[in-house]
Amino acid sequence: MDRFASVFFVASAALYVQGVLAANAYINQVGFRPADSKEFALVGGNGDVEIVNTSGQTALKVTPKAASFWDASGQNVQLVDFSELKAPGTYSIKVGGNVLRSDLVVKEEPFKDVFKAAAKWFYYQRASMALESSYAGQWSRAAGHTNATVELHNSAGSGTVNSTKGWYDAGDYGRYIVNSGITTYTLLSLYEHFPEYFKTLKWNIPADNGLPDLLAEIKWNLDWMLTMQASDGAVYHKLTSLGFPGDVMPAQDNSKLYVIGKSAEAAFDFAGVMAVASRVYKPFDANYAGKCLEAAKKAYSWGSNNMNVHFAANPSDVSTGAYEGDNATDEKLFAGTELAIATGDGSYKQSGTTEYISYWGDVAGLATYEKATHPTVFGGDANEAKQKILGTADNFVARSQKGFGVVMAKDDFVWGSNAVASNQGVWLLHAYYLTGEEKYYTAALKVLDYLLGKNPLDMSFVTGYGAKSPMHPHHRPSTSDGVTAPIPGMLVGGPQPGGEDIGSAAEWKCADYRTGQAATAYTDQQCSYATNEVAINWNAPLAYLAGALEALNAGHAPEFAANGVARNSGTQVSSSSEAPSSSSSAVVSSSGSVGPNSSSSQWTLSIRKNSGSVNLRMTESPTRFRLEDYRLYVERNGKRYGAKGNRLR
């Protein structure tokens, strides 16, 4: 009997002997928004669930849904929908009179701090600068990798280049163009979709000439990427030492750095990102935006003429991350799509869409997003892209109705499974933008619930957030800085049964943590680079998901979005005379009759929120009343939100 099985057996036997109900509730440990759909997972329960407030009163009693089997964890799970619980507060969950947990939180803006931490983590990953305590707090550190002159590895030519800045890729100190590509795109698209929200949102990082914090952070990496382009337009693949460093802080890593390799994949990833950057930064710095666009064009041209130049494997003397590839067609599709949008030049357009979410090795999904959201540019391809997004999203929604109520399937538990989940959430949000259908929004919420604790490990996978979160990530700065707590806001890779770090090199050797189930094959140990490392391309979709959900609920929506997508924390405008019984809402109602003889009737406008209401008398007595004849708006922090469809926008 292995160690996991024996511990499970002893614990189960103890519960049986003591006669205690062997039930567990798995929740999003950070919080649920009052107006959102809300659910948790129950394993081993029997009977109704009581949700009890801090005064000991039952706030809600719920009958769980029928159990369903989740093959990723090998468990029968009941989903408990407690959406009717609206009042902010902290609650306990009781089954059969037993308290299963007392950390169920309902609050406004539940993901705002998670977003800020996930975004700020990129600051902690900055190369070539010291992190001052005024920004970094207890995780301040000296600058690392400050030497601007970097030698070209023989795989990249000869000579030197000047290259500083950028983000360390993961738990090590390499910098890689291919992985920076999808990472930087994801963060740029978040800003491009919600510019008004992110113009003013701050999280204490150094200022950069008045740029919003999100754009200031992204620019640190864009500046590095620009240094990785050769004069002929080619883009170098990576900047690393020949091997991974030891468990040291950045300033103590004295390994010689090299610029290594060139590839069409790097060139096209670079081109796509720079094309997006040219659009996003133009209102702030037209010269910088122009520089990005010219760099994108040169990289695209070089890549198109060198489609057979790949980084298929590391050179024999190099053992850092390869991010290898042997087919650059998806990267070219991504780059051409972005350049077509940025320039209006139809020659960049290419046919092709996909039903699969993207990762660093296949970015066709990014092109699919852009085609679906730019129908005037891409015509028929836009509709094809939309249909593929919706088809995949419908499958995700169906998955989220059973098991742990998450989108992930058993086969999704690969290396970096938490990034798979995050990108599924981003995909679902695009389906929501395009249609306004609530089912997509709700399924995206469930992705974040999973990442923040509603999973069979009963843990939040984001450092520093939740009752139980990783303490020993495979991240050199967090394990060599002398600070007990890891840097907050990091999404660890997550469960996957590959076990690549079991019995490997002595320095990182892990004991066998596999359980026989994909969704529980995880260990919170520094040695586990296969389940507990962090990476920029994993944090970016987490930041997008949390940030977009907060932006939507603050009343914002992408320009291309369907009517009614912006949510204003669930506040809606309806032509119904009845206020919904279980959600915060604004309702337009009238008293008196409507018709040719109604000129003397008394009309009122009622704004109802929960159980309260405010009646506003109109100054006229119309002979006919139509909602579209009147402009209804609210103001918040100086910004006016008007009625759009049946919601405030």
Image (cartoon, rainbow, N blue to C red):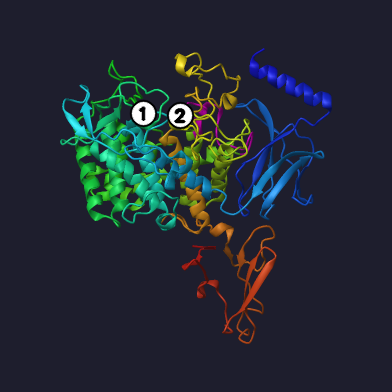
Q: Residue at x 50, y 32 (%)?
A: 492
Q: Which numbered circle lies on residue 243? A: none
295 sits left or right of 481 in the view: left
Residue bearing the label numbered 1: 252
Task: Identify whether 569 is placed above or below 355.
Answer: below
- Under mark 1, the amino acid is Gln
Choose between 123 and 515: the one closer to the eye. 123
Name the secondary structure under disc 1: helix
What residue occupies the far bottom of the structure in this picture? 600
How far apart are the two marked residues, 2 and 1, measured between alpha carbons?
A: 10 Å
Find the magenta span and give its range: 401-418
Instruction: Find residue 27 and report its horizontal and vertical position in percent.
Output: 64, 40
Residue bearing the label numbered 2: 480
Name the secondary structure under disc 2: helix
- Under mark 2, the amino acid is Ser
Sequence-wise first label, 2 or 1: 1
